[in-house]
Amino acid sequence: MQIISENNQKENCWEFKKCGREKGGFNPEKPGICPVLLTKEHHGTNHGINAGRCCWKVYGTSCDDSAQKIGSLKITHCLDCDFFKKVKEEEGYDFNFLR
């Protein structure tokens, strides 16, 4: 089932993961607001808000309560992520991996 957010965009990583690191969320104080929400150059990629549907492109995320590495170490973790797989399936042929 595809979830569409209030602004008619597809579900973003913070909604899927329920991390609470968005502004006004339940967990932004300790690690801070997630850099995915602040990365505006990826807005609209895979139909997401900021980098919300291409979080694998953003360094400094802390998915599953662990700080993500950079480069190939991060992407190795991301390729096995349920959210990554969901976006890839939903986007199909138009899936934007690294652009």
Image: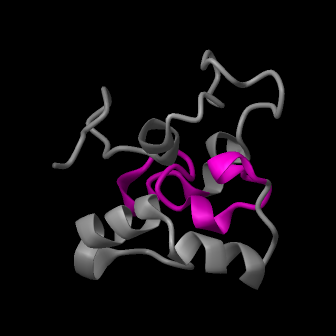
At a point 56% along the width and 79% down the height, the residue shown is 98
Residue 58 on the magenta span: yes
* Coloring basis for residues: one colour
76 vs 39: above or below: below
Above/below status of 5 relative to 36 = above
Task: Magenta stretch: give its range.
Answer: 42-66
Q: Is residue 61 left or right of residue 14?
A: right
Residue that sits furthest to the left in the current view? 1
Q: Depth check: give the residue in front, 7 or 20.
A: 20
Give the image location of residue 92, x and y in percent.
25, 76
User: Residue 73 lies in magenta, yes or no?
Assistant: no
Q: In the picture shown, does residue 66 fall above or below 92?
A: above
53 horizontally vs 37: left or right: left
Q: Give me the residue at 80% from left, 21% from top.
A: 29
**Residue at 36% across, 63% down:** 87
- Magenta region, mostly helix, strand or loop? loop
Residue 63: give x, y in percent of width and height.
Answer: 65, 51
Query: Which quadrant does the C terminus fall into?
Result: bottom right
Q: In the picture shown, does residue 43 fall above or below 27?
A: below
Q: Position of residue 13 (x, y in %)?
A: 49, 47
Position of 77 with respect to 70 (left or right) is left
Q: Position of residue 31 (x, y in %)?
A: 82, 34
Residue 3 shown left or right of residue 14 in the figure: left
Residue 57, image quadrant: bottom right
Count numbered badges in the picture: 0
